[in-house]
């Protein structure tokens, strides 16, 4: 998966999504500490346009969210670093700003009315199916975005979409018919499915140890942060009705029922007292913070936190942007102010054989089972011990006995990409030996015109758009300030 992503990351702007909308509700993910060559926080310049750091942060968060949905729980900051996600985010923005510069030269713009039309469509800003200004402001505040900044980003995204729409290519009916016959080509096929149950492995300890030795850098300890903590005590403070009422008027949008309705003063009273107590305690926490920085006060405790541990969660956002010896200003954890210092980062190291043994054994079995499967399938193929299943097309996922629909889909996808008339196709835990006896063009079906025309359009548009971006990169000077 990583190899595939790294091979396909040069030109990412094939389908531009509204990135600023994707950020809303996705949460913020920091990528660590970087030095920038511009004092005003610009991370790059494209032509006359500068890319601000906060936009790079949003783009990184968008990509992190997308890759998390692909990898699941196994995706983390370390994997993001392996993928070069921060550079990927920058490259995406450079492409976007190339298009914005191009739009300026063409005299293309987006009106305030177009922004407003798009704005009222966004579900996160709606209440009872309609755009709600209070909801809009609240959601943006929760995502640390001000309306002016959001609307500017939205205008830029709409402008990029407008440029992209200029390069959409339509297909003729003749093209659709000709390509359709190729897409839906059919092969007369013989196959034999071999699964893991057909092979056995006798694992020797020495063999496993050699495998671990060769691959020890794949079995690493967890990245660990050593931190110092100081938790400030929360005072018991009595507030007047006037103080509570004034505070409610300033912050009432923060107190809502599960259905989204704003709580009344009486309903929010306990929350108000708690929030106002924290507000009043903030000055004490800041004084302690300054004393800690000067060495006048000592931290209360030192602890270590694994990168993937549950204990790190309250501090994860702060730690992602720190360097050793940095001290973070007071932030709230469990209704108290906490001051944190990063002492050091303990980098991952190869695990010992005993600690890595089970992980190595799993990989060893997977690798060698796959090799044994492939060899057995080749043997079946050489003995011509295959069974005919008749003509199949890319759509014949339900017609291959012995494969689940997802396995059949993967098998057929690989089959119709290969130029070999016989061979072995590897699946997860299975190998399929195949031989193509004959092929015939598919029959054009008008019901599939939309699928075919979209496929042709996407191929043409993607190629055209990639060439455009390469051309714009030559036209507008690109300078990166990231070090």
Image (cartoon, rainbow, N blue to C red):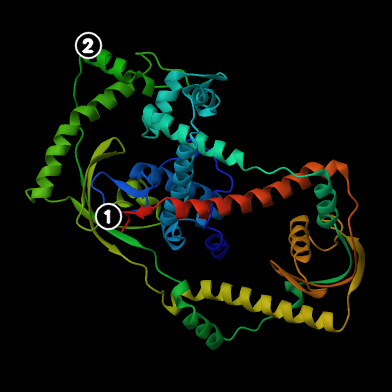
Q: Position of residue 430 (x, y in %)?
A: 74, 69
400 relative position to 297: left or right: right
Can residue 23 be seen here? The reply is no
Query: In the image, what residue occupies the spot 45% across and 77% down?
Result: 216
Q: Position of residue 371 (x, y in %)?
A: 68, 79
Query: Callout 2: few (<14), some (14-19), or many (20+) C-alpha neighbours within 10 Å?
Result: few
Q: Which residue is mark 2?
A: 242
Q: Residue furthest bottom?
A: 206
- Relative to 382, 44 lies left or right: left
- For label 1, the residue is 35
Helix, strand or loop under label 1? loop
Residue 265 lies, with reference to residue 475, above or below; the image says above
Who is closer to the viewer here, 214 or 121? 121
Please report the residue visible at 33 percent of the width from the left and 49 percent of the height from the top: 43
Q: Quick one: label 1, few (<14), some, or many (20+) residues within 10 Å? A: few
Residue 174 % position (x, y): 84, 47
Q: Residue 154 location, x and y as percent?
A: 47, 33
Upstream in sequence: badge 2 or badge 1: 1
Q: Quadrant of the N terminus?
A: bottom right
- Which sits in the foreground, 476 or 76? 476
Q: Residue furthest left?
A: 296
């Amino acid at each position: 998966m990583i190899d595939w992503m790294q091979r396909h990351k040069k030109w990412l702007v094939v389908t531009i999504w509204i990135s600023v909308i994707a950020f809303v509700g996705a949460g913020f993910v920091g990528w660590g500490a970087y030095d920038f060559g511009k004092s005003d926080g610009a991370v790059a310049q494209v032509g006359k346009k500068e890319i601000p750091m906060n936009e790079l942060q949003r783009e990184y968060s968008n990509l992190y969210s997308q890759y998390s949905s692909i990898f699941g729980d196994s995706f983390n900051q370390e994997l993001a670093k392996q993928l070069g996600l921060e550079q990927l985010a920058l490259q995406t923005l450079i492409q976007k700003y190339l298009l914005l510069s191009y739009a300026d030269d063409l005299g293309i713009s987006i009106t305030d009315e177009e922004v407003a039309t798009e704005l009222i469509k966004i579900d996160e800003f709606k209440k009872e199916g309609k755009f709600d200004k209070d909801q809009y402001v609240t959601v943006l505040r929760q995502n640390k975005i001000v309306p002016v900044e959001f609307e500017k980003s939205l205008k830029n995204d709409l402008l990029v979409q407008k440029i992209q729409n200029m390069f959409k290519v339509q297909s003729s009916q003749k093209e659709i018919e000709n390509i359709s016959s190729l897409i839906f080509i059919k092969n007369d096929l013989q196959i034999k499915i071999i699964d893991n149950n057909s092979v056995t492995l006798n694992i020797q300890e020495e063999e496993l140890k050699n495998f671990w030795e060769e691959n020890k850098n794949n079995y690493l300890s967890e990245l660990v942060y050593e931190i110092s903590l100081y938790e400030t005590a929360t005072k018991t403070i009595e507030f007047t009705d006037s103080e509570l009422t004034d505070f409610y008027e300033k912050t009432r949008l923060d107190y809502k029922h599960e259905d989204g309705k704003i709580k009344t003063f009486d309903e929010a009273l306990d929350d108000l007292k708690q929030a106002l107590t924290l507000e009043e305690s903030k000055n004490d926490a800041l004084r302690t913070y300054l004393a800690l920085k000067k060495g006048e006060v000592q931290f209360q405790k030192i602890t270590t936190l694994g990168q993937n541990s549950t204990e790190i969660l309250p501090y994860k956002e702060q730690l992602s942007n720190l360097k050793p010896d940095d001290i973070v200003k007071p932030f709230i954890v469990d209704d108290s102010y906490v001051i944190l210092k990063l002492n050091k980062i303990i980098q991952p190291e190869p695990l010992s054989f005993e600690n890595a043994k089970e992980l190595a054994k799993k990989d060893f079995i997977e690798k060698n089972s796959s090799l044994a499967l492939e060899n057995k399938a080749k043997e079946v193929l050489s003995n011509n011990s295959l069974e005919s299943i008749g003509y199949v097309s890319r759509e014949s996922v339900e017609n291959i006995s012995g494969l689940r629909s997802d396995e059949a889909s993967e098998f057929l996808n690989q089959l119709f990409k290969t130029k070999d008339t016989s061979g072995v196709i590897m699946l997860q835990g299975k190998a399929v030996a195949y031989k193509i006896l004959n092929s015939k063009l598919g029959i054009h079906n008008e019901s599939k015109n939309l699928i075919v025309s979209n496929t042709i359009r996407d191929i043409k548009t993607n190629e055209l758009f990639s060439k455009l971006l390469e051309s714009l990169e030559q036209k507008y000077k690109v300078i990166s300030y990231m070090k």
